[in-house]
Image: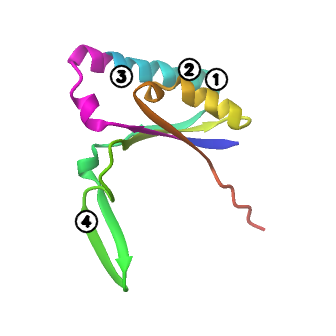
Amino acid sequence: MQFMLLIHANEAAFAALPKDQAEQTLAAYTAYTQALEKAGALIGSNRLQPVASATTVRIAQGKTHVLDGPYVEIKEQLGGYYLIEAPDLDAAIAWAARCPGAAHGTMEIRPILTICSQ
């Protein structure tokens, strides 16, 4: 079963880290990614650009509205994701708990909806 592990964290707090702490955090993510790869659980992952680069699109009354920035201002921003293969939710929770993002933010786990075509 596939799960999306969404990493929510305070982007400004990470940007304010001293260089050595930022490097340690990035090294922890590299080690985590390698552990997922070694276990055969990693399908894909990416870090997102800062929230200031976001563009929001909404259709209202038949008109397209494009806004710079995120949809809402929040304390934690979506900073990246891992798409993993795990046998069940308990295994996905175990992987999410190992992610460095769990220590400095929030991990959201979402099962991938598989739609069968007939």
Q: Which residues are magenta?
A: 5-23
Amino acid under label 2? Answer: Ala
Residue at 28% from the left image edge and 21% from the top image edge: 22
Identify whether 82 is placed above or below 102: below
Whether 12 is among the magenta residues is yes
Which of pointers 2 and 4 indicates the residue nearer the eye? 4
Pointer 3 and pointer 4: residues touching (CB < 8 Å)? no
Looking at the picture, how far across and down is residue 85, in whole percent? 65, 37
Residue 117 x %, y %: 74, 65
x and y, in percent, of residue 50 in the image? 27, 43
Disc on the earlier residue, 3 or 4: 3
What amino acid type should be assigned to the residue bearing mark 1? Ala
Q: According to the image, label 4 marks what residue?
A: 67
* Marks 1 and 2 in Cβ contact (< 8 Å): yes
Q: CA distance from mark 2 to mark 4?
A: 38 Å
* Residue at numbered disc 3: 26
Q: Which residue is mark 2?
A: 35
Q: Residues within 10 Å of mark 2 (few under 14, many from 20)?
A: some
* Front-most of residues 74 and 110: 74
- Quarter of the image for residue 9 reads top left
List the residue tagged with mark 1.
39
First in residue order: circle 2 vs circle 3: 3
State the CA–CA distance, disc 1 to disc 2: 6 Å
